[in-house]
Amino acid sequence: MLGTSIASPYWVYLKLVIMEAHHVLLLLTGAFCVGACPFSLWVGQHLLKKDIRNYGDGNPGAVNVFRAGGRKSGGLAVLLDVGKGTPFVILAHSLFSLSGIALGLIGLSAILGSAFSPLLRFRGGKSIAVTYGVLLALPYHEMVLAFAVFMLLGFLFIKEHSWIVMMGPTGAVAFLAITRASYWQVLFMLSVLAILAIKHRSDLRVAPKFELKLVNWLHSKI
């Protein structure tokens, strides 16, 4: 009896660990499946009756929905692509009280689903919108703020789109490291940087060109 009473707290702890691992696995799977849904492609097919991969850079993303159909359909595609990064991340921390690396993995699962969608033979979109969705859903607002601010700086001073995208996670990693954020936050953002670099690798072979876009815009208005 004594041995059983001593061991019981360990069995309770083990059951809790197994239960949490089960929840994490389900959330990882759900996040990946929703992330893998090519909403922009479906908007093009069903709303515009067009294959958006025939436009622009051939990417099945919201930018080519704008090119194929204009603002309304493009805006809808953006909302859907951002939205698919949010539900399971929100569930993870609000309903299941997950935090730390488990929460980061669930967010990465949604991004990976979008970037390497099985529904598109693992040739998914460039996953910028879903990344914003995941960052917005995380209960750490400094991460999405740093990401957005550095992408804005890139937009103001860099010409090439892919290098502008790289500014977001690169600047966010530097910010998180300087402010001594949790190690998992830095690892999460490094993983985001790696995924986006892989998806933009062909465009990143060209060195970035710098220009003062705001100055040029103001000059054109004078």
Image (cartoon, rainbow, N blue to C red):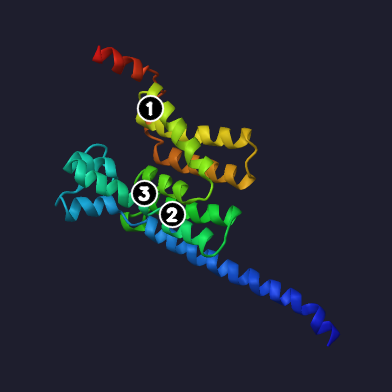
Tell me which numbered mark, 2 or 1, is placed earlier along the sequence.
2
Residue contact at pointers 1 and 3, CB within 8 angstroms? no
Query: What is the distance, in whole Å, between disc 2 and disc 1 at their CAs?
Result: 25 Å
Residue type at mark 2 is: Ala
* Residue 155, disc: 1
Residue type at mark 1 is: Phe
Q: State the residue at coordinates (65%, 38%).
A: 180
Q: In front: 168, or 75?
A: 75
Q: Neighbour class for label 2 at 10 Å: few (<14), some, many (≥20)?
A: many
Closest to the camera, between mark 2 and mark 1, is 1
Res. 54 visible in picture: no
Q: Neighbour class for label 1 at 10 Å: few (<14), some, many (≥20)?
A: many
Query: What is the distance, in whole Å, between disc 2 and disc 3 at their CAs?
Result: 11 Å
Indicate the position of residue 102 as horizontal and vertical percent values: 57, 57
Q: Neighbour class for label 3 at 10 Å: few (<14), some, many (≥20)?
A: many
Badge 2 is on which residue? 110
Q: State the residue at coordinates (39%, 37%).
A: 200
- Mark 2: secondary structure: helix
Badge 3 is on which residue? 82
Extreme residue toward the right, this view: 2
Indicate the position of residue 78 as horizontal and vertical percent values: 30, 46
Closest to the camera, between mark 2 and mark 3, is 3
- Mark 1: secondary structure: helix
Which of the image's four quarters has the C terminus? Answer: top left
